[in-house]
Amino acid sequence: MNQDALSEKKQQIRKTAHAARKAQPDKDVVSQQITDRVMQLPEYTAAKCVMWYVDVRDEARTRQALPAAVASDKDIVIPYCVDGELELFLLESMDELEVGMYKILEPREDLRNVKSKKVGVKQLDLILVPGVGFDARGGRTGHGKGYYDKLLENAKPETPLVSLAFECQMFDEIPMQSHDIFMDKVVTETRVYDGIGRDGSNRGDTA
């Protein structure tokens, strides 16, 4: 599959996934089922430092699970965007978040430069990764901006990558290029898909 065809295919998948996600009924209930499954994963139980994210628009909702995550004995980290790069913030209370640009819940401006709040990507034991469309191999497509790709490239090789998605966001195959990163698991309301992960042998372009 050439570059233009691949880009067009990804764009079509994004469009279909966005529409399906928007039409997803009972988002709160279904999202709770997804986050409950995530928090029961052995990888989650074993992790001391977990990167969550705060849901935006029609994503599977995470914010209802964050208070319990923060109240646990784990370090909970959330990303926020600065000049096209993701910075990491140690979240210790939901009061540390405020509505920022694009109506997204983000760390409060006055806390971002507090040294104890800054976290390095190498400290993460588990990374929860949002996305738009997925397949059963752990193939993922995001919004095409590459924010998470940069972050994931620098994570510890052994750190599991787990995506949360509604079942309606699953596709037969997401076109993947050699630089694209496969997830270790994709968790939906009905099942947990075991992906190829970063060290999988099934890499490269899927023509």
Image (spheres, helix red, strand yellow):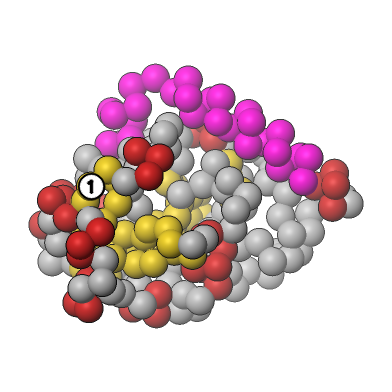
- Residue extent of the magenta highlight: 7-34
- Residue 105 visible in rendering: yes
Position of residue 165 measured from the top left corner of the image (x, y, whole percent): 45, 41
Question: How many numbered marks appear?
Answer: 1
Q: Is residue 131 above or below residue 118?
A: above
Q: Does the magenta stretch include residue 32?
A: yes
Q: Which residue lies furthest to the front in this view?
A: 110
Q: Which residue is drawn at 71% across and 55% down?
A: 176
Q: Left or right: where does residue 185 sit relative to residue 50?
A: right
Position of residue 190 measured from the top left corner of the image (x, y, whole percent): 41, 35
Give the SS element for disc 1. strand
Q: Residue at x 26, y 72 (%)?
A: 113
Overall secondary structure of the magenta stretch? helix
- Residue 55 visible in rendering: no
Q: Is residue 115 above or below residue 133?
A: below
Q: Left or right: where does residue 125 sit relative to residue 73?
A: right
Quadrant hosting residue 60 = top left
Q: Residue at x 64, y 31 (%)?
A: 15
Position of residue 133 measured from the top left corner of the image (x, y, whole percent): 58, 41
Q: In the rendered image, which residue does mark 1 sit on?
A: 98
Q: Which residue lies furthest to the right in this view?
A: 2
Query: Amino acid type of disc 1?
Result: Glu
Q: Residue at x 23, y 56 (%)?
A: 108
Q: Left or right: where does residue 106 sit relative to residue 72?
A: right
Q: Nearer the viewer, residue 74 or 114?
A: 114
